[in-house]
Amino acid sequence: MADVARPNECRVVRARYSIGVNNDYLWVVGSKHRIVVVIKELDRELIARGWEKTVAYGSFRLCAHQIRNPMLLTGKDRVLVAGYSNISFVRE
């Protein structure tokens, strides 16, 4: 669900990106939901560092048709990760 045609709103959020068994997830820090996304560049880094126990925290630019409150995004929302920065890899 990472592709969106012509998103018209973007927000920068602090989030945690991780690889799961079936999906890759982005969790906006403080929210109760995970968003299914794929960020291939971060996938390569996490795989090299041991994806089962490593996550990436950072600033992610999320775009969608409406993002009033990024903390309310769920797996049902279609979002595009337009960019990321300030990434820290953490072993959990």
Image (spheres, helix red, strand yellow):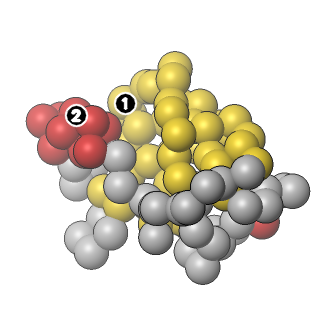
The tag earlier along the polypeptide, 2 or 1, is 2
The numbered disc on residue 45 is 2
Residue 41 percent across, percent down from the top left:
27, 36
Residue 47 percent across, percent down from the top left:
16, 43
Q: Is residue 31 above or below residue 48?
A: below
Cα–Cα gap, marks 2 and 1? 9 Å
Q: Residue furthest top?
A: 86
Q: Is residue 40 visible?
A: yes
Provide the secondary structure element on which disc 1 rests: strand
Query: In the visual, does 37 lie left or right of 79?
Result: left
The numbered disc on residue 89 is 1
- Residue 69 is drawn in which quadrant? bottom right
At label 1, counting other C-alpha atoms closer than 10 Å, the crowd grade (few under 14, some 14-19, many 20 or more) is some
- Residue 11 is drawn in which quadrant? top right
Q: Is residue 70 visible?
A: no
Q: Residue visible at 79% across and 61% down?
A: 66
Query: In the visual, does 36 lie left or right of 6?
Result: left
Disc 2 to disc 1: CB gap under 8 Å: yes
Query: In the visual, does 65 lie left or right of 83?
Result: right
Residue 22 percent across, percent down from the top left:
27, 75
Q: Amino acid at mark 1?
A: Phe
Provide the secondary structure element on which disc 2 rests: helix
Q: Residue visible at 60% across and 79% down?
A: 76
Q: Identify the image quadrant of the C terminus.
A: top left
Q: Nearer the viewer, residue 10 or 52?
A: 10
